[in-house]
């Protein structure tokens, strides 16, 4: 049985761990609210953007439609954009994203496709580089970013667009976490390029009642400006949902850690008291038997 | 009075305006245009400038930078890169940022930086002009 001093030390150390996890939980709760607000505020823009794109892509179906919209016509090289968090201690959040990425990589490879990876966020990069280091073409971290906004998304979007223009891949998928609720986040993969497939997946086509659109300037120019923005918007909402999901997962993880620490402290306290009692009893016996012997 | 126009102004960070209005005047890239209810389907890019939201005798002006206007049978949607309420703007601050952007343009090292600085100059100039009116 451990000595009293050892037990006391353990209780103290578990106690401070509990304080830390409690504090982290509260910080995560506060950040979660902010991140959730940001994710919700960005939603109308993303929705309207998708609707506008749906209208445009219906109108633009000729052979000279931009490649970002209709793709390269091939599907040989896939770029997976894996967005994860920069920090750990948020339960299975990062692991779930990475697991999904691994499954996608395995599935695509077995179909004979070449896979390239662009990771956003440190944790995803660290976990993926062990097995797929050769496939990672680029890596970005959001650690220094105070607030996730359009500029950050544009940075990533520009990188992807540049890679696409250079012919580095045919189809692009984004793997990130979908923010279902505070306690539930599930990873999802969505197509980003060609944009038409992405739109087909997500938006119902509005009924234009046969109306013909007028464009100013012409369709190509509008589309050329709109497409990169659309891509940035998709990335932005993925990042914002990720941020909210990370905080939700962290809050849940820290909550259960705090509870575990509490249980552990109770157990240790019981053991401590028993040991103390046993020690007192032993000392009493010693004194009594000593007195009897005299 | 004719029907009202359903108008949506959204920026990436927030929905700025949503509601029914009489008319919206939008600074299109090829000239300003006014949208009333029942406008034909139409889509245009936007240059930096103020949109004027007319509702009754009320005119609300909001500065927008970059984006798109889309008119569907359901109404008008403007997707703005940035939307700034003119009442919130401090002219001195804009002047300062404009000077800063001009300096950056002078020091730009590559094409990206040049374009980015030009973009900013264009935005602040348009903003100043809008305030002056």
Image (cartoon, coloured by chain):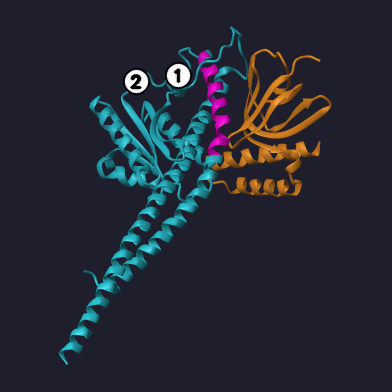
Chain colours: A cyan, B orange
Residues at circles 2 and 1 in contact by the CB criterion of under 8 Å? no
Q: Residue at x 44, y 37 (%)?
A: A159
- First-in-chain label (2 vs 1): 2
Badge 1: chain ID: A
- Picture layout, residue A170 above or below residue B114: above
Residue A188, picture quadrant:
top left
**Mark 2 to mark 1: distance in Å?**
18 Å
Q: Is residue B52 visible?
A: yes
Quadrant of the image containing the N terminus of chain A: bottom left
- The residue to which callout 2 is attached is A74
Q: Characterize the magenta stretch by its predominant secondary structure.
A: helix
Q: In x, y percent, where is residue A252?
A: 42, 46
Q: Is residue B29 visible?
A: no
Residue A113, picture quadrant:
top left
Task: In this rendered view, identify the residue nearer to me: A93 or A65.
Answer: A93
The magenta span reads: A38-58
- The residue to which callout 1 is attached is A200
Residue B120, picture quadrant:
top right
Residue, far left? A293
């Amino acid at each position: 049985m451990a000595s009293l001093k050892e037990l006391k030390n353990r209780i103290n150390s578990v106690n401070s761990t509990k304080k830390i996890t409690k504090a982290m939980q509260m910080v995560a709760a506060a950040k979660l609210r902010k991140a959730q607000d940001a994710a919700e505020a960005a939603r109308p823009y993303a929705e309207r953007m998708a609707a506008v794109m749906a209208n445009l892509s219906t109108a633009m179906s000729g052979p000279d439609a931009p490649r970002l919209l209709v793709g390269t016509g091939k599907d040989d090289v896939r770029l997976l954009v894996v967005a994860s968090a920069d920090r750990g201690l948020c339960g299975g959040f990062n692991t779930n994203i990475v697991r999904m990425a691994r499954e996608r990589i395995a599935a695509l490879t077995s179909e004979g496709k070449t896979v390239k990876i662009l990771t956003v966020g440190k944790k995803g990069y660290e976990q993926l580089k062990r097995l797929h280091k050769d496939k990672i073409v680029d890596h970005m971290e959001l650690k220094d970013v105070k607030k996730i906004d359009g500029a950050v998304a544009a940075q990533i979007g520009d990188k992807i667009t540049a890679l696409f223009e250079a012919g580095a891949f045919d189809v692009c998928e984004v793997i990130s976490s979908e923010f279902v609720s505070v306690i539930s986040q599930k990873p999802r993969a969505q197509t980003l390029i060609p944009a038409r497939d992405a739109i087909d997946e997500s938006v119902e086509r509005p009924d234009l009642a046969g109306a013909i659109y007028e464009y100013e300037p012409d369709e190509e120019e509008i589309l050329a400006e709109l497409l990169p923005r659309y891509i940035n918007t998709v990335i932005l909402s993925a990042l914002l949902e990720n941020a909210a999901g990370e905080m939700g997962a962290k809050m849940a993880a820290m909550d259960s850690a705090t509870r575990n620490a509490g249980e552990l402290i109770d157990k240790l306290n019981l053991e401590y008291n028993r040991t103390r009692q046993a020690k007192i009893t032993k000392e009493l016996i010693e004194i009594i038997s000593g007195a009897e012997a005299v | 009075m004719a029907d009202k126009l359903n108008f949506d102004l959204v920026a990436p960070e927030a929905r700025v305006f949503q509601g029914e209005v009489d008319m919206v005047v939008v600074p299109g890239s090829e000239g300003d245009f006014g949208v009333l209810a029942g406008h034909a389907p139409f889509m245009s890019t936007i240059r930096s400038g103020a949109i004027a939201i007319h509702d009754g005798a009320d005119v609300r002006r909001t500065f927008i930078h970059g984006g798109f206007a889309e008119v569907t049978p359901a109404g008008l949607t403007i997707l703005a890169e940035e939307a700034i309420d003119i009442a919130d703007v401090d002219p001195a601050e804009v002047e300062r940022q404009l000077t800063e952007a001009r300096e950056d343009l002078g020091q730009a090292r590559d094409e990206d930086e040049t374009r980015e600085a030009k973009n900013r100059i264009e935005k602040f100039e348009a903003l100043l002009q809008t305030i002056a009116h």
